[in-house]
Image: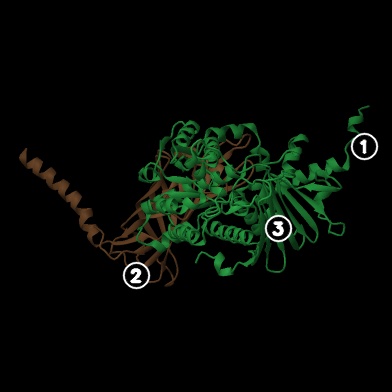
Amino acid sequence: MNNAETSSDLNRREFLKGGSFATLMTLLGGVEILSRSPARAADLDTLVPFQINCAVIGVGTWGREVLATLARLKTAQVTAVCDTYPASVKRGTNAAPNAKGVDDYRKILEDKEVKAVIVATPTHQHKEIVLAALKAGKHVYCEAPLANSIDDARAIARAAKESRKQVFQAGLQNRSDPQRRFLIDFIRAGAYGKPIKARVQWHKKQSWRLSSPNPDREQEINWRLNKAISLGLVGELGIHQIDAASWFLNQQPVSVAGFGSIINWKDGREVADSVQAVFEYPGGAALTFESTLANSFDSDYEVYYGTDAAIMVRGPKAWMFKEVDSPLLGWEVYARKDTFYKETGIALIANATKLTSITEKATDEATYTSTPLYFALESFLSNVNTVATAVEDFSGTFDTSDKAALDKFLADLKLTPAAGYAEGYAATVMAIKANEAVVKGEKTAIGKELLEVG
Amino acid sequence: MKTKQTLIASAVILLLGVPLRAAENWVRYVSQPGASLVKVEGTSTLHDWSVETKLLGGFIELDPAFNLEKPVPGKVNARVAVLIPVRQLKSDKTAMDTVMYESMKEKDNRRIDYRLTEMTLKEAPKAADAPFLFDTTGELVVAGVTNKIQMAVTMVRVGADKLKFNGSIPVKMTSFGIQPPTKFGVFSTGDDVKLTFEWLTARKEETAK
């Protein structure tokens, strides 16, 4: 007698898991089952749909992170790197061996082969480079914050808005992260109830100070510690979490109160090593940002509190912690659970149902293992290709003097999700106002009109 | 001998001259951006698929003898050239589009071209706003392969100076040397696809040269 075939071995949970998967796949026409077949993966891996010649301007620590990420993207062809510091240029060309190294960004803008630039210089240098790059017809990826003043950020955003034949992407990489895009649909569907508050933190025990044998160079590379040009922890780092939270809350803040102090790193710096900022949203919801360079406990994460549940986001993973009186959604009964001290979190994993079908082990892993930066740059290159080919093909098909028709055609293009100039500008204003509140230790209003590019 | 050469030269001049002279008075309508749509629909062993684009360029030139107010059934002197940039044909799945472009050898054949060779008005419209019904023959160039196609096309007048054409035709990928993509693992796309178009043209004031 074969016990394996008795009904007792087919437990209800496994049956339902299999059943729901089959149903989902049927609804999807079965495509996704095959999307994981080795044959397709191999074929798509060998196909290079397009390649964009791009250059990275500013190859400090973050610029080299950008280069390392571009090296993994088959759609990127890095042809030039630029930095005013020779050693950085050398490190840049080491990271991108086929790229030429230059010390002046204007040389890159003159290079007709370069179609797109990624601007990863210190924040206060963005404006001059971005405006010149857009004027030179380049597609631009500008790191966030866009600028350290509202005037500069607005100048960048307006120039980007006018440059309709070019892609402008703000470096708010979370906006392109598929895990977050999965979560936003989930949150907007009301899964956690009415938004109450959000709390985000970025903790790391590090000085934030870079060293150099050259005193002038040391001052230059430590621009983040210079009160006159740095937006501090809340602006330079917090902008990503503040933008993500406002995006999730689907609101923009009306005010921000801040507090900051230098507690641990008393090395002559002028920028606080520990800050708190509280954003107030219409309707009463609040966002608290906490950051310190003096303690690393719990690293960085975001928690969104709603009337029915709290949702915690940590890198590529997220969990939901339900209230006892919250409505039963159904699927969570079978979802993976993780224990956090006295709480049980229901794992929110994009495409979790599909992963379950492959192996049980797969559910222990996040679906998207690449960094948000990878997805953001992937989106940028894809959108550059879409827009550039659309402009070229439109010009080859119709009379280009009809600007309204071209604008309409470009507006209808399906682009890969990414932060544009409007999102970049609004987030930059939030960061600037938050830093202002932290520096002054007071509450400051954020006018609605201030958040609009105009 | 000299007479023969003169005759040949005259014949060549005459042959070249006829279309040029004819074109001088022909009425030219050019493709209008944003108002046209080309859709290609196909099947696979798993689900149906489609790609589309609004980029449909080209023109139609009509012999002024063809009176739009009082059309007479029969052969219509007309010239049509249509182009579609292949890479603008898109579905919702970028990866699938990439496979399609590869199959269509897009890098070497950037456009789908169509040229009309013959157009016959089947019957005059029964009302002022009723469509004109044409039988057409033309050459369709896809992936560098030219095939003769016959297609029923309807035309309606839009306002005083625009013409809108609609048509649809089944074609086989293999007839254009395209192997139906099977790069998705265990499923494959069907050889038969349906090409549907809606094409808006507007009268261009300048006389065609």
In the depicted structure, whether residue B28 falls above or below residue B90: below
Measured along the vertical axis of the image, is residue A401 above or below residue B111?
below
Mark 1 falls on what kind of element?
helix
Amino acid carrying mark 1 in the image: Ser
Provide the chain ID for the residue under circle 3.
A
The image quadrant of residue A428 is bottom right
Chain shown green: that is A
Label 2, secondary structure: give it. Answer: loop
Q: Callout 2: 10 Å neighbours few (<14), some, many (20+)?
A: few
In this picture, residue A134 sits left or right of residue A61: left
Residue holding disc 2: B70
Which numbered disc, 1 or 3, marks the residue that appears first in the sequence? 1
Label for residue A8?
Answer: 1
- In x, y percent, where is residue A398? 37, 56
Asked whether the residues under the numbered discs 2 and 1 touch, taking CB atoms below 8 Å apart as contact, a structural biologist would say: no
Q: Amino acid at mark 2?
A: Lys
Can residue A246 be seen in this snapshot? yes
Chain assignment, label 1: A
Q: Residue at x 55, y 69 (%)?
A: A449
Residue placed most toward the observer, A234 or B205: A234
Label 2 chain ID: B
- Residue farthest along the right direction in this orientation: A1
